[in-house]
Amino acid sequence: MNYRAVRAIYLFEMARTWRTLLQSIVSPVVSTSLYFVVFGAAIGSRISQVEGVSYGTFIVPGLIMLSVLTQSIANASFGIYFPKFTGTIYEILSAPISSFEIVLGYVGAAATKSIILGLIILATAGLFVPLHIHHPIWMLTFLMLTAVTFSLFGFVIGIWADGFEKLQMIPMLVVTPLTFLGGSFYSIDMLPPTWRTVALLNPVVYLISGFRWSFYEIADVSVAVSIGMTLAFLVICLIVIWWIFRTGYRLKN
Amino acid sequence: MSSIISVANLSKTYGSGFKALKNVSLDIKRGEIFALLGPNGAGKTTLISIICGIANPSEGKVLVGGENIQASYRKARSLIGLVPQELHTDAFESVWATVSFSRGLFGKPKNPAHIEKVLKDLSLWDKKDNKIITLSGGMKRRVMIAKALSHEPQILFLDEPTAGVDVELRKGMWEVVRTLQQSGVTIILTTHYIEEAEEMADRIGVINKGEIVLVEDKATLMEKLGKKRLTLHLQGKITTLPDSLSHYELDLCDGGATLVYDYDTKGDRTGITSLLSDLRSAGIRFNDLDTTQSSLEDIFVDLVRTS
């Protein structure tokens, strides 16, 4: 194991976060605060409670997941796409480092950033609404699992993308809609039966449901199913990445 | 001298069907400067890319320091430093950060003293805190060399190292390369500047259309393939050559003011003595004469044309 190489990639990626602090941390926090103002205060004032929890408090896990999902994908996809774009990927490919170590460096850094961001948003939410986390260990487990899984997904997108448009395409056109429709701002029990069934096809529902359960012990689907679905997506991403490195897809000629 | 790189029957066919390398076999000796010459698209960069792990071979085997580049890629790659043809840099990083990153990537422990030495050797020390985006093209090229040297490689690949670099800087780089060779580093360089190969290389390989056309010691190559030219400046202009001189295949140039005779240095007899004697018999006198040796460029052009 080339630990120094993993550390070098990890610290290099983290350094980019500190260098672009405004974009990496401050911007998502401001956006989340705006969600609280719009959804929590404006709409929340018309919805008293959801499953025994005030609306403002109810949306906190969904808001954190929204940022963690999008930022995990954005961080990891940009992290690997940028060296491809600038050509500096030659150095990664010619270094004595395995594909696992490359993924560990990039995905580790992307997931770390997302987790930090998720915790900052959690702290920000605490300024707006009272919070009590019933299962903090499970909350952190869901947070880490989601950050890692979607960072892996972002890594795949970063490899696949051959232009900035493609880099944005899946996060903008697929992930963001799925997140908004995945119960970030409502319980899927509030939907008509047909749409509730359709919503269950959305993988993000399981992530948000499990994460919300760790906060308030309320869930749209069982916790075991939430964990199972997240792990299944993680395994799929790992298989795709294994195939990418095995074949050299869009990395090596 | 033992081989530090051994390429055997290497072929590379791209997805489009284009064969970039065709059954290439090549040995690079430890400690030498090897110049790989070839026209654009000859396969130079593909060959380097495969040895360094950037491209996958279709067939064949490559050993670096006795290690297979695929089975023992960690050991093989840790011996190699690569300076690619294009200026690929992390524009927003400082020189120090990017060079230190390269050392870490190759699994080496931090060694600020070594990084400092590399940067000083390449005249980059006073730029160590500058962002790369602020540097000139020549400086960026040196940063890339510094990155390649950061992990103390035994082999250095320089793919067109002085492309777009001014003459003064180019000569400075040659000095750096020579110093590296003296410290035991094996250097493989590709270049379009024949003058560069002629100046620096111990051995020369010529690649064309994916095939190695020739590998030879530079001096031997120059001697073996080099032709010399004798130019005679005549006392008076002549319009035709007498039949007695026809077998020398002389060229009458400058409107009849000079005679040019090409001869082969390999031969036991150059024919110069008899030519001069026959000229005197024919009554053709000259004021001056000079000889010139064909350059590596002439040899290269000949080889590529005939291969």
Image (cartoon, grey):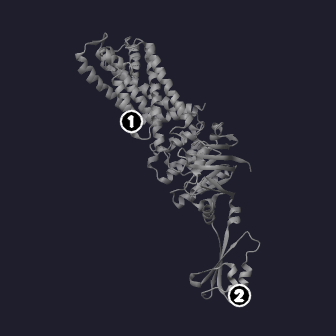
Which quarter shows the N terminus of chain A?
top right
User: 10 Å neighbourhood of mark 2: few (<14), some, or many (≥20)?
Assistant: few
SS for dot 1? helix
Extreme-bottom residue of the structure: B283
Which quarter shows the C terminus of chain A?
top right
* Residue A233 x %, y %: 47, 23
Q: Label 1 amino acid? A: Gln
Whether residue B122 is situated above or below residue B112 in the rendered picture = below
Which residue, given by chain and number where applicable, does mark 2 sit on? B280
Which of the numbered marks, if any, corresponds to residue A168?
1
Question: Can marks 1 and 2 be said to lie on one chain?
Answer: no
Q: Chain of mark 2?
A: B
Residue at (63, 51) in percent of width and height: B188
Residue at (54, 58) in percent of width and height: B169
Q: Is residue A58 visible?
A: no
User: 10 Å neighbourhood of mark 1: few (<14), some, or many (≥20)?
Assistant: some
Q: Chain of mark 1?
A: A
Whether residue B66 is situated above or below residue B169 in the rendered picture = above
Which of the numbered marks, if any, corresponds to residue A46?
none
Taking the image as shown, residue B104 lies to the left or right of residue A56, namely: right
Measured in 3D between alpha carbons, the distance from the residue under mark 1 to the one under mark 2, in whole angstroms, is 83 Å
Extreme-front residue of the structure: B17
Residue B259 versus residue B80: which sits nearer the camera? B259
Residue A223 versus residue A112: which sits nearer the camera? A223
* Residue B259 x %, y %: 63, 81
Extreme-top residue of the structure: A52
Taking the image as shown, residue B162 lies to the left or right of residue A176, namely: right
Tell me if label 1 and label 2 are in contact, CB under 8 Å.
no
* Residue B92 x %, y %: 44, 43
